[in-house]
């Protein structure tokens, strides 16, 4: 271990001995020439008691380091940082780099203490003769202290104070330097300095600088490369090679100054110096890895970043969370599964092209944990309009970098189905479904404030009619709008909303759920993660788990924190089983029968909004759940999915079973290829089989009711949503609510 330098008494003694020299030279002998005060030139202080030169402990928060994000298997997928720095041990740094930095910055580093008074005076004389700064005046220890104080500053005012040219600042640094010299060995101080120093080109620390400048690790640096980096620390902004030729020329000059100094000190031969000086600068400008835009999983990366920045589990304040992520040197293990992500990416590319204006997005969630296994979208993430990139998280809510979302359509009918089963209805209990539904009284629907909100002026329709008796099964399989409006009236609007909320349903934009009578028809904007996670809870027999992206964080010191799923029983397990039984029929007897199943137990629901503004499919197995949406981010109400070519195929109208359903199917087939199938728990037929409350078919709708059936497409006065003539485009089996031709 290297010896420690001279201590407090040695420094004080040197100051006394060299006071006369300092005075003669016009220097302030506090170890450094200090700036002029009041035009009087260089000041002079000689009495150590006046300087109060006693060691003062330095608070040393660890320097900012890069945080690495990994997939579920430990492979790196992204990096986050405020300053790109990779801390390395001193033995991982090339000897020539250590020699170069000591030669130019503090050649007596291993001989003196906190301050090199003799070296300071010699440097002053050398620089005065040269007409500029060619040799360092502050010791490496003092420079380390300055960097620590600068890196510890949170505000611009604190940063300015750490850099101000004043007696107080220099003396403060000296006191801290004396304490540092007593606390650490010389090797330890050198290692800390090389890891904290800024080299320019956004490279902090010698490892980052070696990679940025030359594409090598610090241990692989050659003589000219080491001299270049050693020359850069004096004024890294003036010699930043990334800024242009002028700065590169300055850096080349500084490199040669370092080589000459090394030769002067006998560290290299004149021939070696000449040979090194004859080489080109060799700056490569290697890009640092990191950031979500360069990640293979950009949408998941954005989700992880926002999860840390917004979740109090990772810091009490926004500033604390930002520092934790961008400065903490963390290793963040996540839930993303590369196989499942690849399955989602491939399925989306098959059905929707990156150049298409409408965008498909998909999320996969594991039932029973809430672990997000994949987040994919048809358009690349970024800010280039030429490449049709998009700059927000299409797959998630606004809290995780997303936008306003898309109206979820008939995927919300599942929450009304669950509410009916919770209240004791059996799968063959039913209601009369007319060609149209209109509230007969404002009290038919009450929001969760108890207010009557039944709308007497609008009628919900099933485009092609097919009125009649519908059970929980047949009404769900056919996605019959009028049936679900009547069912919601029966079980209660507020109760349906409560069911949805218990499964984590919230608006993508973060606003409160809209509590209209048409709630069951999906008038609220959603994101795929939220919808997939709600359906995952049904697959987990009613066990709701909050969406989860992070499983483990290891800090820079190796401390490991594991994060467990946050779950609760939201729905009676047998109610969830019954709902899964009904929804499984969507593949065999309902809106997805033309698409077909996946060869294992699966259940789901299509969804298409009014006039095919958006389309969805949400489905689940006991092993994996997923939700797929498609819509035009330019404005789904203005750019509806009618008469469009998507993925090279022409669609008269897009429904839930046209594109989202096939994407979901193709994804699941590939994602679950090597996963042993798990079966649904069979329905409790004694509790839910047959019919109990409403077994007898009701009379067919009256002629008067048929006459009152009409389609409303105008915006309402509550935020521009289509009125209850919702989900009534042609082809009801796309999940648009009709029971006509079916989504294609």
Image: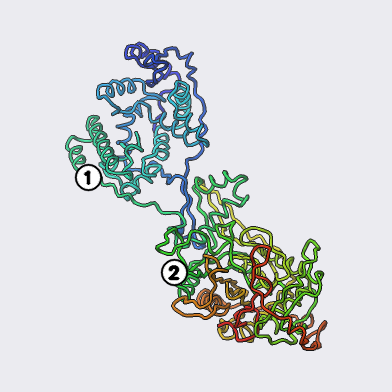
Q: Nearer the viewer, residue 384 or 455?
A: 455
Q: Quadrant of the N terminus?
A: top left
Query: Horizontal placement of 280 versus 729: left or right?
Result: left
* Residue 11 found in image quarter: top left
Q: Nearer the viewer, residue 561 or 31?
A: 31
* Residue 245 found in image quarter: top left
Q: Quadrant of the C terminus?
A: bottom right
User: Dot 2: what SS?
Assistant: loop
Q: Residue at x 52, y 65 (%)?
A: 633
Other-residue count near label 1 (Cα within 10 Å), few / some / many at <14 / 14–19 / ≥20: few
The residue that disc 2 covers is: 354
Q: Earlier in the sequence, mark 1 or mark 2?
A: 1
From the viewer's perspective, is the residue at label 1 or at label 2 nearer?
2
Other-residue count near label 2 (Cα within 10 Å), few / some / many at <14 / 14–19 / ≥20: some
Q: Residue at x 76, y 69 (%)?
A: 493
Is label 1 in contact with label 2 (beta carbons under 8 Å)? no
Q: Nearer the viewer, residue 523 or 697?
A: 523
Question: Compared to 120, does 390 lie above or below?
Answer: below
**Res 280 label:** 1
């Amino acid at each position: 271990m290297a010896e420690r330098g001279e201590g407090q008494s040695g420094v004080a003694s040197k100051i006394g001995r060299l006071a006369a020299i300092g005075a003669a030279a016009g220097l302030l002998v506090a170890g450094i020439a200090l700036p002029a005060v009041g035009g009087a030139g260089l000041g002079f202080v000689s009495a150590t008691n006046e300087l109060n030169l006693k060691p003062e402990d330095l608070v040393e928060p660890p320097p900012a380091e890069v945080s690495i994000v990994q997939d579920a298997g430990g492979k790196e997928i992204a990096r986050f940082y405020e300053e790109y720095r990779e801390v390395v041990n001193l033995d991982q740094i090339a000897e020539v780099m250590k020699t170069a930095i000591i030669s130019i910055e503090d050649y007596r580093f291993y001989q003196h203490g906190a301050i090199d008074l003799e070296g300071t005076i010699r440097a002053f004389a050398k620089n005065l003769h040269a007409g500029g700064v060619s040799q360092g005046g502050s010791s490496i220890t003092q420079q380390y202290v300055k960097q620590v104080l600068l890196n510890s500053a949170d505000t611009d005012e604190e940063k300015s104070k750490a850099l101000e040219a004043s007696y107080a600042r220099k003396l403060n640094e000296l006191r801290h330097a004396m304490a540092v010299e007593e606390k650490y060995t010389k090797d330890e101080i050198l290692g800390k300095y090389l890891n904290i120093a800024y080299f320019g080109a956004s490279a902090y620390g010698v490892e980052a600088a070696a990679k940025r400048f030359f594409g090598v690790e610090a241990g692989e640096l050659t003589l000219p490369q080491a001299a270049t980096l050693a020359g850069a620390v004096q004024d890294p902004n003036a010699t930043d090679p990334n800024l242009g030729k002028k700065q590169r020329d300055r850096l080349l000059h500084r490199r040669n100054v370092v080589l000459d100094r090394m030769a002067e000190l006998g560290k290299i031969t004149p021939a070696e110096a000449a040979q090194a000086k004859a080489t080109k600068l060799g700056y490569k400008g290697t890009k640092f890895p990191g950031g979500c835009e360069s990640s293979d999983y950009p949408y998941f990366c954005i989700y992880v970043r926002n999860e840390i920045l917004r979740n109090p589990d990772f810091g009490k304040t926004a500033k604390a969370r930002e520092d934790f992520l961008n400065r903490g040197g963390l290793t963040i293990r996540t839930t993303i599964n590369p196989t499942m992500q690849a399955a989602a990416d491939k399925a989306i590319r098959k059905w929707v092209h990156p150049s298409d204006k409408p965008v498909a997005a998909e999320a996969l969630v594991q039932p029973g944990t809430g672990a997000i296994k994949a987040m994919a979208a048809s358009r690349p993430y970024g800010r280039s309009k030429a490449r049709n990139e998009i700059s927000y998280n299409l797959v998630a809510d606004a809290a995780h970098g997303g936008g306003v979302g898309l109206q979820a359509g008939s995927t919300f009918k599942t929450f009304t189905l669950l509410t009916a089963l919770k209240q004791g209805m059996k799968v063959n209990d039913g209601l009369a479904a007319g060609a149209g539904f209109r509230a007969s009284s404002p009290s038919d629907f009450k929001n969760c404030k108890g207010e009557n909100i039944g709308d007497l002026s609008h009628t919900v329709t099933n485009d092609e009619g097919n009125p009649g008796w519908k059970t929980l099964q047949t009404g769900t399989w056919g996605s019959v709008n009028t049936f679900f409006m009547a069912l919601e009236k029966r079980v209660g609007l507020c109760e349906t909303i409560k069911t949805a909320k218990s499964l984590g349903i919230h608006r993508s934009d973060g606003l409160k759920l809209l509590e209209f009578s048409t709630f069951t028809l999906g008038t609220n904007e959603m994101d795929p993660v939220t919808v997939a996670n709600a359906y995952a809870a049904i697959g987990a027999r009613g066990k709701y788990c909050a969406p989860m992206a992070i499983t483990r964080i290891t800090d820079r010191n190796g401390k490991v924190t594991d994060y467990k799923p946050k779950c609760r029983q939201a729905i009676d397990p047998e109610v969830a089983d019954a709902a899964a039984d009904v929804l499984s029929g969507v593949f065999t007897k309902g809106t997805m029968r033309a698409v077909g199943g996946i060869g294992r137990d699966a259940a789901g629901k299509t969804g298409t909004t009014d006039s095919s503004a958006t389309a969805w499919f949400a489905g689940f197995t006991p092993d994996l759940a997923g939700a797929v949406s498609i819509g035009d981010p330019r404005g789904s109400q203005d750019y509806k999915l009618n008469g469009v070519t998507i993925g090279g195929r022409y669609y008269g109208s897009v429904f839930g079973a046209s594109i989202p359903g096939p994407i979901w199917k193709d994804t699941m087939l590939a994602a679950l290829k090597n996963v042993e199938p798990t079966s649904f728990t069979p329905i409790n037929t004694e509790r839910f089989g047959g019919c109990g409350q409403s077994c007898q078919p009701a009379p067919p709708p009256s002629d008067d009711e048929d006459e009152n059936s009409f389609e409303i497409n105008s915006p309402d006065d509550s935020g521009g949503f289509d009125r209850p003539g919702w989900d009534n485009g042609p082809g009801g089996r796309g999940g648009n609510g009709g029971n006509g031709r079916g989504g294609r």
